Amino acid sequence: MRTLYHYPLCPFSRKVRLMLAEKLLDFTAMIEEPWGGHKAFLDINPTGDVPYLVEPSGDHIGGSIAIVEYLEETCPDTPLLGKTLQESAEVRRLMEWFDIRFYSDVYQKLLYEKVLKRFWEARGPDSNAIRQGKKNIETHLLYITWLTDRRNWLAGDFFSLADATAAAHLSTLDYISEVPWEKYPEAKDWYVRIKSRPSFRALLNDRIAAFTPASHYANLDF
Amino acid sequence: MRTLYHYPLCPFSRKVRLMLAEKLLDFTAMIEEPWGGHKAFLDINPTGDVPYLVEPSGDHIGGSIAIVEYLEETCPDTPLLGKTLQESAEVRRLMEWFDIRFYSDVYQKLLYEKVLKRFWEARGPDSNAIRQGKKNIETHLLYITWLTDRRNWLAGDFFSLADATAAAHLSTLDYISEVPWEKYPEAKDWYVRIKSRPSFRALLNDRIAAFTPASHYANLDF
């Protein structure tokens, strides 16, 4: 059986969960707090980082980029990285955009500061960073608006890991009600379409102890 | 002719420059300041982001992850992403480690704050972030020490994009003399080996106006 070690509010883990579900691949999901360092997990994965996938073949794959490329190659049904060189390049460009730029501009400044910092560093949030994160998320919603104005999905006319990655990141911010959807109706329309896909269901059921999600978080018609 | 738009202190651009040089692929290098937004560049690439590659075929590829996967597929000589599924997974895991984790833990807190923030935001550096960045870089040097203690190169017995990516990131910090090499001799030995590769030469010749690099920056025997 395939096992995925993940953390519910980790956007990289969410991307992999969406991919596995889109490809209809069964897996056992094991929650690991990335700051936790449980010995049993560190014995399997010395860095303690999630996502971490253990395949039925015995292969161990760490990190979301390695995992999505591995799964696309070994389970090519329902391609999610594009079918041509050019499509793949555009999907990967947008994955990187959200994994590096959104993560650093928004997730680290908003979700990390407001929710996770207390676990990692036992320190309180930095209000400057939060202010910057709230400003930065609007740039990214504008970019999604710009893209969906020109295309059916982010990377073109096909649903891909570009959409899954962007939605994985945004959904963590939506969990804490930090996405100003009302100001960006086109971005919201795109998110509603992803939210109603069967692959998204498990993410909507995520609950973190001590952090109840926003009331609209799991609502498909928010 | 192949054209790469890049910025000298952008670690993602550096990774692509190293890959092109390792594969002995000729290219014209065009410097773009990512905060600059030159109209001529925005006409080609609406996000203004670097690295951005224009291929002789006419293909445009944005983002370092899309570029390295594209080049590995279209120019397979001198493979840099591993030869087997397992090797590729380990190379990509380490690429992501440096591109996301090192970038967010160290580059954003140290190089961005000390050098680039004034251009992007016209604001001064945040001393808390700098302190954190100086602490974080040691964790990454320890990880390189741990890896090179077990392997000849970061991902195994072969030079790969894991090494190029880690060196690309570290070299930007080395430019501003923020790598405490003397405390991590094994990491330094590994870096010396990469620094003396012909592919690294162009990076050592980089000079940013108003920022002279550290005196040891281009020294192969520092």
Image (cartoon, coloured by chain):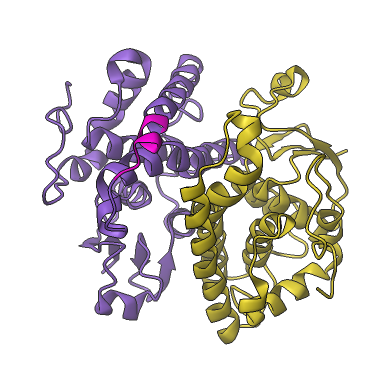
Chain colours: A yellow, B purple
Specify the principal SS of the magenta part.
helix
Q: Is residue A23 visible?
A: no
Q: Which of the 4 image quadrants contains residue A162?
A: bottom right
Q: Residue at coordinates 77% horizontally, 75% vertically from top-left?
A: A193
What residue appears at the point 65 percent right and 48 percent down from the top-left corner?
Answer: A12
Residue B47 is situated, as x and y percent measured from the top left of the image, at: 41, 71
Horizontally, residue B139 falls left or right of residue A198, namely left
Q: Is residue B4 magenta?
A: no
Above or below, A61 against A23 in this view is: above
Quick check: B128 above or below B188?
Answer: below
Reply yes or no: does residue B127 show up in magenta. yes
In this view, B132 is above or below A65:
above
Between B216 and A88, which is closer to the camera in this rendering? B216
Residue drawn at 17 percent across, 21 percent down = B222
User: Residue drawn at (32%, 44%), measured in percent from left and top?
Assistant: B113
- Compare residues B83 and A203 and report the one nearer the observer: A203
Q: Tally the numbered discs.
A: 0
Residues drawn in magenta: B125-132
